[in-house]
Image (cartoon, rainbow, N blue to C red):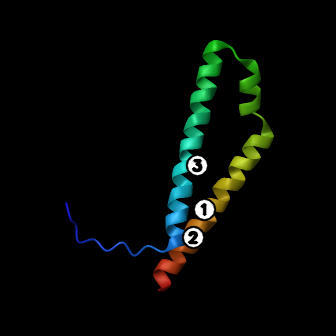
Amino acid sequence: MNFNFNNDHNLLFKWACRGLKYFLLTLLGFAIAFVISQIFGAVSIVGILLSPTLWIWIVRIAVSLLCMFAIAIMLESWG
């Protein structure tokens, strides 16, 4: 099928979308690992997943992605 859509998104927007996709897949993987480790009683994995250091990095990555989206949206609306 050939659609007549013009894909003029800038490169930063494409990178931000790809980064968001993999970030959400990573969070889904963490959630699955947490549930599976709770079921089988793997306390060490639960401790790693609940560590403050990991969540600090997750928040940093989320903020970076949000900033990338904000810059990409500004560039899209400007040009």
> Which corner quadrant of the image does residue 34 belong to?
top right
Q: Position of residue 39 (x, y in %)?
A: 61, 15
Q: From the viewer's side, name the closer residue of 18 and 75.
A: 18
Residue closest to the far left: 1
Q: Earlier in the sequence, mark 1 or mark 3?
A: 3
- In this rendering, the label closer to the viewer, 2 or 3: 3
Count of numbered badges drawn on the protein: 3
Closest to the observer: 5 or 60?
5
The amino acid type of the residue labelled 2 equals: Ala
Picture disc at residue 23: 3
Q: Is residue 42 left or right of residue 52?
A: left
36 over 15 or under it: above or below: above
Q: Are marks 2 and 3 in contact (CB under 8 Å)?
A: no
Q: Which mark is residue 70?
A: 2
Label 1 belongs to which residue? 66
Query: Residue at (55%, 37%) from the top-left corner?
Result: 28
